[in-house]
Structure formats: structure tokens, C-alpha cells
Amino acid sequence: MAIPGKPMRKSRADVRNNAILNYALREARCDKDLRMNDLAGEVGVSARAIRNYEHLDDNPSDRVAEAIARVLDKGVEYLFPYALRRIAQERRKARYQRSKNGKG
């Protein structure tokens, strides 16, 4: 199922307007007709956490990743491949450095 107003992407991550997104997670959520709030409630995290996972601002714990995969009927590695986890890790590290240096 395509996201309304968004063209289908072949890659799992895309750069558009400086935003890197996890399209596999977003598309799997939309295929199940779940809003972020719905998925968050079923998994036991906040909607903000789901947003952070989709925008690669954070990585879920193993427990949360497994719960998301179970709800969406997908594999953990499909939803959170190593390359995307690495991007989120680097973004988190850069945010920490900016805050540590008083720039952020």
C-alpha cells in the first residue's frame, strides 16, 4: 500500500529535504492501516518513539524491535536493517556532540 501523497520508493531509506526515512517501517505500518498512535499502543511505546524510528532519530531496543515486527508481521532485519540502524546511531551521536558543544 502506498502512502498517500508519497511515491513508492525502491530503497529503504531516502533523502528528501534533509530527511532520512525508514520507508520499510512506514509502509508496513500503513499496510496494516495503523497510525503511529495505534502501533505505539500495541507495542507499549510512545507515538513519538515510533516517529523517531521512522525518521531514524533513534533505534528501538531489541525487545521493542521484536514487538514491532510481530505486530507488523515482518522480520526485524527487514524493518531495521543494519545500514539504517547505523544511520540512526550516527545521527544520535552527532546530536549528542552538538548538545555537548552547546550548539543544539
Image (tube, rainbow, N blue to C red):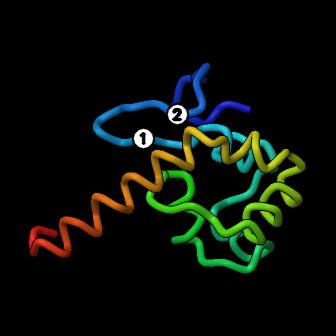
- Looking at the image, which residue is at 47% across and 53% down? 88
> 19 or 35, which lies in front?
19
Q: Is residue 55 above or below residue 68?
A: above
- Whether residue 45 sits left or right of residue 42 in the image: it is left
Near mark 2 (Cα within 10 A), the count class, few <14, some 14-19 or many ≥20, is: some
- Looking at the image, which residue is at 67% across and 60% down? 35
- Whether residue 43 sits left or right of residue 98 in the image: it is right
Q: Amino acid at mark 1?
A: Ile
Outermost residue toward the top in this view: 10
Marks 2 and 1 in Cβ contact (< 8 Å):
yes
The quarter of the picture where residue 95 lies is bottom left
Outermost residue toward the left in this view: 102
Q: Residue 58 at x, y = what percent?
A: 50, 62
Image quarter in which the C terminus is found: bottom left
Q: Where residue 89 is drawn, which disc sits there?
A: none
Q: Residue 44 at x, y = what percent?
A: 74, 80
Q: Residue 24 at x, y = what percent?
A: 67, 39
The quarter of the picture where residue 93 lies is bottom left
Q: Secondary structure at mark 1?
A: strand
- Looking at the image, which residue is at 58% across and 71% down? 47
Query: Cα distance, mark 2 to mark 1?
Result: 6 Å
Q: Amino acid at mark 2?
A: Ala
Q: Which residue is mark 1?
A: 20
Image quarter in which the N terminus is found: top right
- Whether residue 5 sits left or right of residue 61 in the image: it is left
- Looking at the image, which residue is at 49% across and 42% down? 21
Query: Which is more N-terminal, label 1 or label 2?
Result: 2
Q: Secondary structure at mark 2?
A: strand
> 26 or 57, which lies in front?
57
Q: Where residue 13 is drawn, which disc sits there?
A: 2
> How many marks overall?
2
Q: Residue 55 at x, y = what percent?
A: 47, 51
